[in-house]
Image (cartoon, rainbow, N blue to C red):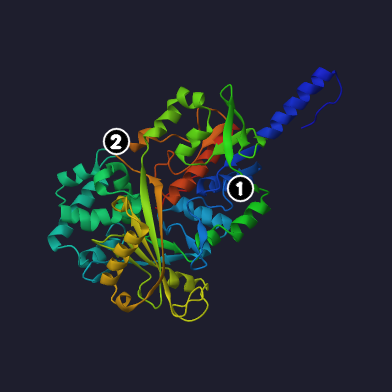
Amino acid sequence: MAVRLGGTAGSVGVVVKHVRSLLLAERVLIIGGGLAGLAAATALAPRGFRITLLEARNRLGGRASSFQDAASQQLIDNCQHVSMGCCTNLAHFFRTIGVDGFLAAQPALYFMTPDRRVSRFAAADWPAPMHLAASFMRAHFLSPWEKLRICWALWRLRRAGTQGDDPPFADWLARHGQSPRMVARFWGVVLVSALNETPDRVGLRYARKVFLDAFLRHPRGFEVEIPKVPLGQLYGQELHQWLERHQVEIRRQTAVKHIRIEKERFVGVETRSGDQLESGCCIAAVPHDRLLGLLPAETVERHAYFTNVRHLEHSPITSVHLWWDRPVLRLPHVVVVDGIGQWIFNRTMAEQSAGLTKGGAGETNGAESGQYVQVVVSAARQFRGLGQAEIERRVVEELRRLMPAARTAQLRNCRVITENAATFSALPGVDRWRPVQLSPIENLMVAGDWTATDWPATMEGAVRSGYLAAQAILALRGFRERLIRPDLV
């Protein structure tokens, strides 16, 4: 753009102000270095925007992050995060930053009951939804009659509409003849893991989505992908190199204190250290309760868009990390039926596949012939009020029932981590409280898995929200570009 110099001081001031506004319009401030903020950055930076990303902590990844355990000196994850074949936007994000090779696909899932029997689920070379039929019919933990009733309910679920008020899924199950045992051994096993919520608390909309997208629509939808490296490495060197190549400015340990709003427009932020930062556009990719604390109170109260998010509820996740003096689990993972936890992950096997261990089988992080196992307990309200010692006792007791080798093994170290606000709860009708990414403040977008993404609280939902926020910014500048990746077909 050519700028004519000269004229009066006043006209020069107007020109300078106009040029400054144009420059600011090309700069986007992203608050939050979790998956939503990172996804927005990877969508906007290659399209000519100058990105400044503010992260309160000294690492990126948000809830999908790692820290060094003092006792084991090991980099461990807050909680095991997994992807699935149906998570097309998360897969696109991983390919974009170059870390897709750090994920190990699990072509089979292993379901274990308290009697230690295991059923293997793998897709046959049949079209969906029949690809898992043979494995399902061989499952030892359901009777033939129960399998027939569940198949009929799945057929009805596939045909169920998504309109209406999103009724409780428990009511739907009862109307379709699903017994408490079927709910506990099939529907609940899937939903508690996928939604971090119990079947009696979720709505039909997202329960239906889980089963359709993951199991009924595409043969690859159910395939679990587990990171072979700690999350701190998944969002480590490759991510930082990508951000550096695209001139994304990262400011770690920069917590935002206030979002400044003037005349219904975003004008900048104030950090806790007192710095004032301006930009022509902002994406607030932070938890919903954190967002309300950053905004001026009068802005929140003036718009139902913001006040509605107060209705969102949280659900906790507990992750139990255990280091044994010898191998206790030979499978890559176990899905537990009728247990305290839902998943048991063989982290040593995952690290060996990535070349992170120091030597022979089972040897990791300097522990001779040891094994690192992680147990994930979703919707972990059962642990409220319990100390870490009691949680450890209950989990170890169950592991020793399920895995005979653990009965004689020595537990070298254990770490219990609970995230009380791990996800929002997919309660019936929850979407009425989830805001779209374009806020009433025209140059302020919001992102996070809690926003309106048509997905529950997942890494896929977080990435989708970042892409949608970036898409909204492009639309403000007159570009109608779709950033969301298509579902598996």
Q: Nearer the viewer, residue 306 or 146?
A: 306
Q: Is residue 309 above or below residue 396?
A: above
Q: Who comes first in sequence, dot 1 or dot 2?
A: 2
Amino acid identity at mark 1: Gln
Q: Residue furthest left?
A: 145
Residue drawn 73% across the image and 30% down it: 20
| Circle 1 crowding by C-alpha within 10 Å: few under 14, some 14–19, many from 20 | some
Q: Position of residue 109 (x, y in %)?
A: 33, 66
Q: Is residue 275 above or below residue 315?
A: above
On residue 163, the disc is: 2
Closer to viewer: mark 1 or mark 2: 1
**Can residue 480 be spotted in the picture?**
no
Quadrant of the rendering where the N terminus is positioned: top right
Total count of labels: 2
Give the distance between the C-alpha atoms of the residues marked 1 and 2, in whole angstroms: 44 Å
Determine the secondary structure under disc 2: loop
Say which quarter of the image contains residue 374: bottom left
On residue 253, the disc is: 1
Amino acid identity at mark 2: Gln
Q: Position of residue 19 (x, y in %)?
A: 74, 29
Q: Nearer the viewer, residue 276 or 246?
A: 276
